[in-house]
Amino acid sequence: MYYKVSPYWVESRKMWRVSVTRNGVRKTFSSAVPRAEGKRIVRQKAVEWLENGDNSKNMRFSDVYPRFLQFYYEKCGNNTSYKRYVSFGNNHLLPTLGKYPVGSITLDQWQSCITKARPQDGRTKELSKKTLGAIRETIAAFLKWAKPRKYVEEDLSSELFIPKCAATKGKDILQMEDIERWFSDPTGLWYEKALMFQLMVGFRPGEVLGLQLSDYDRSTHILTVNRAINNQGEITPGKNRNAHRSILVDGIALRLLEEQLERTEGLRSEWIFCGKLGQKPSPRKYYQTMEKIVQARDLPKISPYCLRHTFLSMVEGYLPSRAMKAVFGHSESTDSHALYGNHIVNGELVEISDRLKVTPLYQKLSKIE
């Protein structure tokens, strides 16, 4: 489409200038470049704005990325993904690409944000494979948003890769002597039984906090995961479709669960591991309780999520691959676990429970009163 745009020279300011209107919005463009070149630049800017509005491929990445964040925030709120996009954008994308026109950023430049990414805290020399994958996912989310809005010509995210040499960061776990020392001398803190229970069943922290009375059948001792509470205190359906699963609670896990139900019976709360007044559990206080226990019982510095990894390391040799997926609620095969199948057949919960009872984790702790 042809636009009649006629820049004029402002002698007092020594610049070319033109004002145009698009959808009721008026905008002025100018350039101090003299002669015909300056006039051409001003006209090109004005025509580009008339055609695309503010969605210009010549806008700096540092000006476009905040629009992506604003869009995502309005759509999804202040969730975990939004916070990750803010963090990775500020630490790994904007410092490298912020000054470039967003439409001119090449595949190699996007890839360099992954390949050359380094930790910001200085405590480690390189980022883990998981973190690099999260940076790639951030870039992919931005490009998916930017393409239909004409900030970029094409979505290059499918070409991005994680270097094979990227480090795989292991999780800290408790050793058997740490667990025995803790269970032999509990602190009595409010969320401690929830943390102990998590260690004995391998749930994610949010899954433990999300348990309600309606999820537990006291006649059969079957407990079902139906929801989770994320770090923002929001109730979610869980990490993936396989997160919804049932277990047969037995041994010390059953004892902890029944003690918790007796402890909170008078609070009339719908939550199994409720707050002190019966309210919805607090993820922040849950994590703070773990920190206090670590300090009080001289345990390795771990988070509640590491209790899940501790359970995995203690029982994986005693459970078949199908049972592993049933217990952990994985979404796909991971490493050597070969987790297949998505349904529990009759008697399988009993078999899993029997197998867990012979693990050192259950055997040794069953002797602690």
Image (cartoon, grey):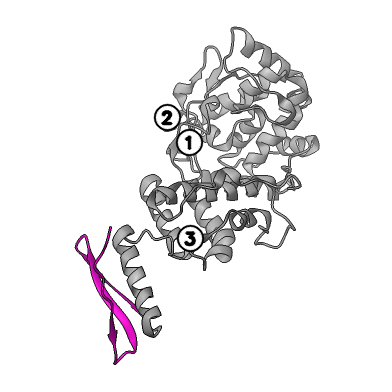
Q: Residue at x 71, y 49 (%)?
A: 301
Magenta stretch in the rendered image: 1-30
Q: Residue at x 76, y 18 (%)?
A: 358
Q: Compared with residue 290, is residue 267 higher up or lower down, i.e. above or below?
A: above
**Residue at image mark 1:** 274
Q: Compared with residue 273, is residue 299 higher up or lower down, i.e. above or below?
A: below
**Residue at image mark 2:** 270
Viewer-proximal residue among 357 and 231 = 231
Q: Is residue 315 magenta?
A: no
Label 2 element class: loop
Q: Amino acid at mark 2?
A: Glu
Q: Earlier in the sequence, mark 3 or mark 2?
A: 3
Label 3 element class: helix
- Distance (Cα) linking label 3 and label 2: 50 Å
User: Is 200 left or right of 213, judged from the image as shown?
Assistant: right
Q: Residue at x 28, y 87 (%)?
A: 10
Quadrant where the C terminus is found in the figure: top right
